[in-house]
Image (cartoon, helix red, strand yellow):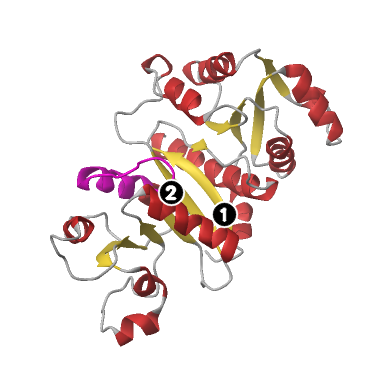
Amino acid sequence: MKHLTDLLDLAKQGAPQRLVVIAAEDDDVLKAVIEATAQGIIQPILVGRSDEISELLTGLEADPSDYTIISADSLEQAAIAGLELFKNGQADFIMKGLIDTSVLLKNVLNKEYGLRQGGLLSHVMVYEYERYHKLLGMSDGGMNIAPDRSQKKQIIDNAIRVFESLGYEEIKIGVLTAKEKPTDKMPATIDAEALSQMTWPEGVTVAGPIALDLCLDKEAAKIKRFDSPVAGEADLLIVPTIEVGNALGKSITYIGGGESAGIIMGAKVPIVLVSRADTAETKLYSIALGKMISQYNEEESQ
């Protein structure tokens, strides 16, 4: 897949999924929701301050009566009201609005709503930028600060599921480090080597330790004599710490002019989680990504 518009086109296929937007009183979130609804990707349920949501919808030339709006006076109430829908089988996936991430995830992990699966929650980004020839995934630059080896394994598992939902039969993964030779002086290289030697699902190739240039540039790999199917063809980068992921992701966006979609994996349903600074377009792509994962989960359970 080369472009995020390809993801958008893919998400238009199949029945719309029911998206709960928690604390939906946000202009860019609603722009994305309106567009995703118009394209048949979602059936939205908007939870939050109903008067404010209706006012914003009207300002965006949408009719509030066309939308299901559930009133909630506080962020905590919005989270509870939204997650109750999953408990009752009335929703398929979640989007974060103006609610704090910590408040949302605290409630997602509450066993009462049945969304907790016992594994690790992790953030997966998918980027499009001009200098790379296809979409590029990255994890985890948004949630886990300094994951250990076991947690990195779960981060990879979560990210694999994202790409499987997009129809990838081969997934090439680079476990990023600063050099290619394992050394005790750089514990991330030891983890990367161990991860590369684990058994992965058919079609998944994991390389590590491997530096960023080798993941993205075949010529660099040739010069350094690094022979791997991942060299210059990475679909997914696994970062060693949140700082690396945060800096790399923002570099792609703000220096490289890239576009992105983001999702939290590891719960029973995907959670669309984007920055308040993200554009309505980024939010739309993220909704499309969440729809594909939700649809994939549904198909698997049948």
Mark 2 lies on residue: 162
In magenta, the rendered stretch is 139-158
Q: Position of residue 219 (x, y in %)?
A: 38, 84
> In screen coordinates, is 210 left or right of 237?
left
**In x, y percent, where is residue 197?**
16, 60
Q: Quadrant of residue 175?
A: bottom left
Label 1 sits on residue:
260
Please name the residue shown 32% across and 50% down the image. 156
Q: Visible in this render: residue 20? A: yes
**Dot 1: what SS?**
strand
Q: Which mark is residue 113?
A: none
**Is 251 situated above or below 38?**
below
Q: What's the residue type where badge 1 is placed? A: Ser
Q: Is residue 141 magenta?
A: yes
Give the total of numbered labels: 2
Query: Residue 154, how many percent across, how many down?
Result: 28, 43
- Location of the C terminus by quadrant is top left
Circle 1 residues within 10 Å: few <14, some 14–19, many ≥20: many
Q: Inspect the image, locate mark 2, and give the three-letter code of the amino acid beneath it.
A: Val
> Considering only vertical position in the picture, is 121 above or below 225?
above
Q: At 27% from the left edge and 58% from the top edge, which residue is drawn?
A: 202
